[in-house]
Image: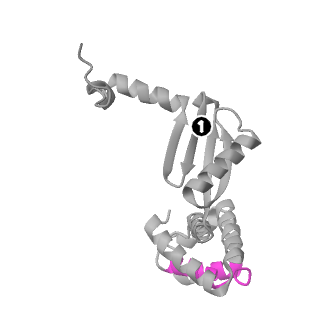
Amino acid sequence: MLARRIAHRYTRALFSLAQEHGTVARWEGELATLAAVLASSPELPRALTHPEIPLARKLAVLERVFGGTLAPEILALVRLLITRGHEPDLETIHGMFVEEWNAARRILPVAVASAVPLSAAQAQALTELLARKTGATIHLERSVDPALIAGLVLRIGDHVIDASARGALDGLHDAMRGTPTYAYAHPDPLRGSTSP
């Protein structure tokens, strides 16, 4: 798998070029297709990264399979990855390209898991609340996880907000196993002393 920092550097350069050419949507589609082809044909990425296959042969295979079907800039990126000895991890690059595009359009994907299905009204209210808080257009991806018992869990990028009963019970369990939490160890200064 391509290191995230390397993938990010290549993706930002490709996205910047796509913006200059006005081809962001088309290139996103081509990256998605390319990632799907490579994922469905594992022998192809293996051949493109095999240390005993000469570089010229790898590039010839790449040209034969994708030449004329991809934007020259995308084909050049894959060529560059292979030439530099990196795995052509187009799934990661495609995901990062979409993230860059969403950021440019101020679109924020949010995954919400709830114990029971959210109604349309609840999903709309949550979407509106998140839009007000973030200033972004929210794309809500809903799923159901009965193990949450009640409530929901939000995933926004790398951040997780756990407002589920399962999360509260896990937190209580951890607190009871470990040392007392601050709330139990110290009286609330706004309520005064707890001593008799």
For the point 69% across and 60% down, which residue is it?
Answer: 40
The answer to whether one can see residue 104 in this image is yes
User: Which quadrant of the rendered structure holds the C terminus?
Assistant: top left
Above or below residue 175? Residue 56 is below
The magenta region covers 57-83
> Observer-nearest residue: 25 or 91?
25
Report the predominant secondary structure element of the magenta stretch: helix
- Where residue 108 appears, as percent x and y from the top left, is 60, 59
For the point 49% across and 53% down, which residue is it?
Answer: 158
Query: Which kind of residue does numbered mark 1 sit on?
Result: Leu
- Where residue 142 appears, as percent x and y from the top left, is 68, 45
For the point 63% across and 70% down, which residue is it?
Answer: 105
Q: How is the image coloured?
A: one colour
Residue that label 1 marks:
152
> How many numbered marks does the figure carry?
1
Above or below residue 58? Residue 142 is above
- Where residue 14 appears, as percent x and y from the top left, is 57, 79
